Image (cartoon, grey):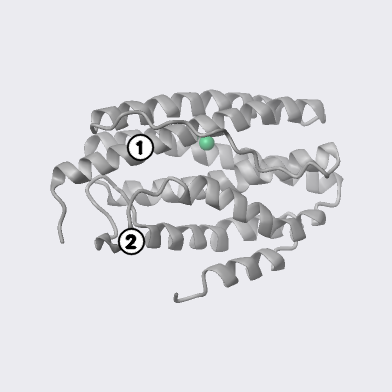
Amino acid sequence: MGHAPQDERQAAGVEWAFRAAAEGAQRARFERLAERLHAVGALPVITDGARRAAEDEARHAGVCARLAEGLGASAAESPPVHFVTLPTLPAAARVLYEVVSVCCVTESLNAAVLTTTLEVASDRAVRAAVRALLRDEVGHARLGWAHLTREAQRVDVAFLGPLLPAMLAASVREEVFARVAVPPEEGAARDDYGRLTLALRGALVREALTAVVLPGLEGCGVPVEPARRWLDARAPPGA
Ligand SMILES: [Fe+2]
Ligand SMILES: [Fe+2]
């Protein structure tokens, strides 16, 4: 059932081409967030952080595209950027919702996937690219936690609780599963290039949500029971 190394290499290239497009999407999200954070009077350190994050993502897109090319894949077409938002919310609440989606959820999941990729990948070029991304993504997640923590001191953030299932569904689908290139029937949960199967990614996402994201939200005063129920319904323990 093994695949030729050349196939693995090519498939890894395709995955990194998808990642390049995803990094480009995060860039667009952070650019929009920086403007909106500024408009609702967020702390300059947060607004500036979002601007720098957009620059990071532009750099990441280049790192991923070069790696994909080096692995023999051509650039993936960038789909239109999907913004996870809720237009019916008042401006400041809507920006908080978007920050939680982009930073606290998506970047935390990104960091978890990259951390595991670094653990399993042996290919030098892949490891160098993952290292180039990982520290920044952790910083991008922290930016969200900083904004949420500050907002929680000024306003009631409990309104986010019932909104979490839809936010998680959209964020997880967009950022984690949309670009998965390893079919679960391929057997090995990993290869030299750090590709993870859908099953392993699913388990990772579940673990990161359960151990990092939901406790972080709860610590800021966001009720997470609806999110826990959503998670349990989608990925029962031991499944
Ligand atoms: Fe990134
Ligand atoms: Fe990021």
Name which residue lies at 51% across and 45% down: 175
- Placement of 61 over or under 92, stated as above or below: above
Classify residue 133 by image quadrant: top left
Left of 169 or right of it: where is 19? Answer: left
* Label 2 element class: helix
Task: Tell me the CA gap for discs 1 and 2.
Answer: 18 Å
> Is residue 222 in view?
no
The numbered disc on residue 16 is 1
Q: How many marks?
A: 2
Query: Would you place residue 178 above or below residue 80 in this image?
Result: below
User: Against 80, is 150 above or below?
Assistant: below
The image quadrant of residue 161 is: bottom right
Q: Amino acid at mark 1?
A: Trp
Where 199 sits versus 24, above or below?
A: below
Q: Is residue 5 visible?
A: yes
Q: Residues within 10 Å of mark 1 (few under 14, many from 20)?
A: many
Estimate the x, y position of residue 57 in percent, counting from the top left: 50, 29
What residue would you read off at disc 2?
184
Frontmost of labels 1 and 2 is 2
SS class, disc 1: helix
Tell me where residue 4 appears, x and y as whole percent: 13, 48
Q: Which of the two discs, 1 and 2, labels the residue nearer the N terminus?
A: 1
Looking at the rendered structure, the kind of residue marked 2 is: Pro
**Rendered residue at 40%/38% (across/down):** 18
Asked whether mark 2 lies closer than 8 Å to ligand 1, one says no
From the top left corner, tell me how far across and down residue 100 is, in percent. Answer: 67, 46
Residue under the image location 73 percent in, 54 percent down: 220
